[in-house]
Image (spheres, grey):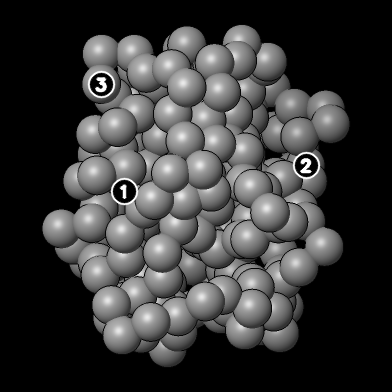
């Protein structure tokens, strides 16, 4: 499973939320799709609108045709236009595209929560060289769970072998029955967080 990356910006999630333009229907984002493969990018951006009361307009989120290595997005609003990198291989996976879109909307990785050590163990020695920053843990002053429990099923949670260097697990769940790394749909908690974030 390919893992999306969040590029850190100058703003934390909480400061981003304070700066977003909120309306009674949620926040408007601006979307520009200069290319689209089989309509997948458009589907990715239209589909969540039925779950959460935000909507996209042209020219805010920009998804150019790029084969620069990796799927990634800045976290939250960064300047006048938000660019998401979607190389060809990335858009084969709708859930991976959703993952990057949620970064743009202000989400960090679920395993970056301040309380993640109560739910998962990060196996640092199995993480590929130079990839450890993807497993950074943030304080509650930077990342908020909006009062929701840790969500193993979040589309923002890495899978157990994310960035492995040796084929062994890099994330081990403390609940032996928990499954992590799904890229099929927003989880129920993902939707709740979005609704709280944008006052829907």
Marks 1 and 2, how far apart in space? 22 Å
Label 1 element class: loop
Tell me if label 3 and label 1 are in contact, CB under 8 Å.
no
**Quadrant for the N terminus in the image:** top left
Asked whether, in this view, residue 115 is left or right of residue 48, the answer is: right
Asked whether, in this view, residue 190 is left or right of residue 113, the answer is: left
Q: Say which quarter of the image contains residue 84.
A: top right
Nearer to us of marks 2 and 3 is 3
Asked whether, in this view, residue 197 is left or right of residue 19, the answer is: left
Nearer to us of marks 1 and 2 is 2
Marks 3 and 1, how far apart in space? 29 Å
Tell me if label 2 and label 3 are in contact, CB under 8 Å.
no
Question: Which residue is at 61% across, 11% downward?
Answer: 67
Residue 142 versus residue 177 in the image, above or below: below
Residue 132 numbered mark, or none? 2
Asked whether, in this view, residue 9 is left or right of residue 43, the answer is: right
Work out whether residue 39 or residue 4 is closer to the camera in this orientation and state it: 39
Q: What x and y, as percent, mark residue 183?
A: 32, 38
**Quadrant for the C terminus in the image:** bottom left
Residue 79 versus residue 44 in the image, above or below: below
Q: Which numbered disc, 1 or 2, marks the residue that appears first in the sequence?
A: 2
Residue 39 numbered mark, or none? 3
Q: Which numbered disc, 2 or 3, marks the residue that appears first in the sequence?
A: 3
Disc 3 crowd, CA 10 A, few/some/many (<14, 14-19, 20+):
few
Residue 179 numbered mark, or none? 1
Work out whether residue 193 or residue 86 is closer to the camera in this orientation and state it: 86
Q: What x and y, as percent, mark residue 75?
A: 63, 56
Question: Which residue is at 73% across, 56% downward?
Answer: 79
Disc 1 crowd, CA 10 A, few/some/many (<14, 14-19, 20+):
some
Residue 180 versus residue 66 in the image, above or below: below
Question: Which residue is at 60% across, 15% downward?
Answer: 66
């Amino acid at each position: 499973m390919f893992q999306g990356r969040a590029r850190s910006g100058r703003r934390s999630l909480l400061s981003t939320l304070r700066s977003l333009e909120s309306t009674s229907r949620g926040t408007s984002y601006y979307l520009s799709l200069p290319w689209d493969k089989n309509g997948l990018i458009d589907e990715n951006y239209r589909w969540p609108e039925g779950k959460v009361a935000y909507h996209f307009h042209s020219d805010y989120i920009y998804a150019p045709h790029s084969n620069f290595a990796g799927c990634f997005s800045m976290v939250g609003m960064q300047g006048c236009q938000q660019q998401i990198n979607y190389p060809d291989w990335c858009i084969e996976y709708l859930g991976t595209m959703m993952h990057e879109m949620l970064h743009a909307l202000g989400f960090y990785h679920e395993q970056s929560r301040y309380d993640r050590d109560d739910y998962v163990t990060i196996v640092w020695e199995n993480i590929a060289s130079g990839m450890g920053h993807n497993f950074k843990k943030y304080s509650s002053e930077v990342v908020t769970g909006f009062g929701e429990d840790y969500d193993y099923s979040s589309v923002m949670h890495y899978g157990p072998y994310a960035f492995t260097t040796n084929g062994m697990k890099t994330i081990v769940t403390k609940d032996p029955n928990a499954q992590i790394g799904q890229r099929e749909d927003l989880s129920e908690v993902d939707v709740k967080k979005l609704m709280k974030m944008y006052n829907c």
